Image: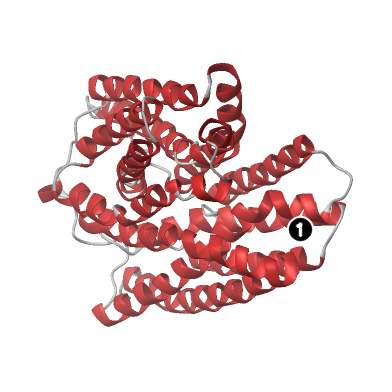
Amino acid sequence: MTITTTAPTAAPLAPDAGTDLANRRLSIAFLNWAHAIVHFVILIYPTVVIALQAVYGESYSTLLWLATSSFVAFGLFSLPAGWLGDHWSRRNMMTAFYFGCGVSLLGAALAPSLYVLGFALFALGLFAAIYHPVGTAMIVENATQRGRTLAFNGVCGNLGVSLAAGITAGLTALLSWRGAFFVPGVICIATGFAYLWYAPREARHASARSNSPDVAMSTTLAAVIFGLFLVVAVSAGLVFNTISVALPKIVDERITGISLVEVGGLTTAVFLCGAVAQLTVGRLVERFPLHVLFAILAIMQFSGVVWSAYASGTMLLFALAFTMAAIYGQITVNDLILARYSADAWRARIYAVRYFVTFMISGVAVSMIAVLHARGGFGLVLGVTAIVALGFLIGAILIAILANGVEKEKARSLQPAE
């Protein structure tokens, strides 16, 4: 008896498959650009404030307080932004992001007084708050390779952080401090029109989004893991904001005999190490379980902070680069884990809670740096940060243990019955 076999033929692509892929890529491109914009615009004022000292004759500390409302709004309004993204329209929310940030920046550029400038900065924080809960959910929704896509998106945000001070300083020197707000404002509004015109319409609305996560778990276990993620979000926010804000001054104090320009260059180089790490992590998530990578990056982050506390000279740069790589790497994995264990229908709200905690804690981080540095220098600052990173490590390991059990249960359920 002869058995003939026929090689399976590939299923033909649906007529609209190519269009759907192109639409996904276009949406992701706009979201990557938005991630760079949001981190750039929120950091314009901390550089502009140096020029405002001469204009208004006020002290640095007095003028810096104007930015408080912006950063508070940046964290606070992520909660309603996430809710609106899930219940109304994520595309419309991103349209509001571009136009809202643009108009707020123009308002800051044309502000006739410090009071108006403060209100414009508050509005900027309000509209900038839209991106992280809504944009991250849209990235996950449109990505065909979540790891690589989220990693590159993280790099775009990292570049916004890295380039904000240099470009703002250049625009201030060339056009005055008003120009430093005006030019990005025009770019935001122009991008808003391009987004409105070219970005594809939402294929799925709130009622059509899935209510089932990629990996299901019991309500009790989901609540426990969500609680651990809140602990992780608090500790991650403190570590991230403390290291990021203090980084230039750490380099300035611990590496002697270098100019301010060199301090800025070395700080940028350390930040870019985080971008490289995100790209690497984006590939690693395709080979290793997310919860395992999360635990490893938590160990790296804790080790890096401890190392930085004792290092000086050239070795300090290696320690800070190692720490920044772990910090930015865990951000990518954190987003991916949340995406895996949450349903698309309420994913924006989950991200809203996470970023609300992360960004609201930035004020605590700045105060912590000021108080601890006055008492014991950066040795004490980094020592306390290491304790916080230890809390992150414990939370990440507990999440990894619980997630490992869930993944094993899913694997068993997928095995065919014998």
Where residue 305 sits: x, y (%)?
A: 69, 66
Residue 26 location, quadrant:
top left
Which residue reaches farthest bottom? 220
Q: Residues within 10 Å of mark 1 (few under 14, many from 20)?
A: many
Instruction: Decide if residue 113 is on the left or right side of residue 11.
Output: right
Q: Is 304 rendered above or below residue 38?
A: below
Q: Residue at x 58, y 32 (%)?
A: 54
Work out whether residue 5 can be spotted: no
Residue 214 location, quadrant:
bottom left
Colouring rule applied to residues: secondary structure
Where residue 173 sits: x, y (%)?
A: 60, 22
Q: Is 386 rendered above or below residue 322?
A: below
Using the image as rendered, state which of residue 111 and residue 225 is in the foreground: 111
Q: Amino acid at mark 1?
A: Ala
Which residue reaches farthest left? 207
Work out whether residue 398 can be spotted: yes
Q: Is 326 rendered above or below residue 168?
A: below
Tell me the SS state at disc 1: helix
Q: Residue at x 57, y 67 (%)?
A: 368
In this rendering, the count of numbered labels is 1
Q: Which residue is mark 1?
A: 319
Instruction: Decide if residue 179 is on the left or right side of residue 379.
Output: left
Q: Residue at x 55, y 57 (%)?
A: 241
State which quarter of the image contains the C terminus: bottom left
Where residue 365 sits: x, y (%)?
A: 54, 63
Which residue reaches farthest right? 257
Instruction: Decide if residue 346 is on the left or right side of residue 176.
Output: left
Using the image as rendered, state which of residue 417 and residue 92 is in the foreground: 92
Where residue 16 sits: x, y (%)?
A: 22, 26
Q: Is 191 rendered above or below residue 146?
A: above
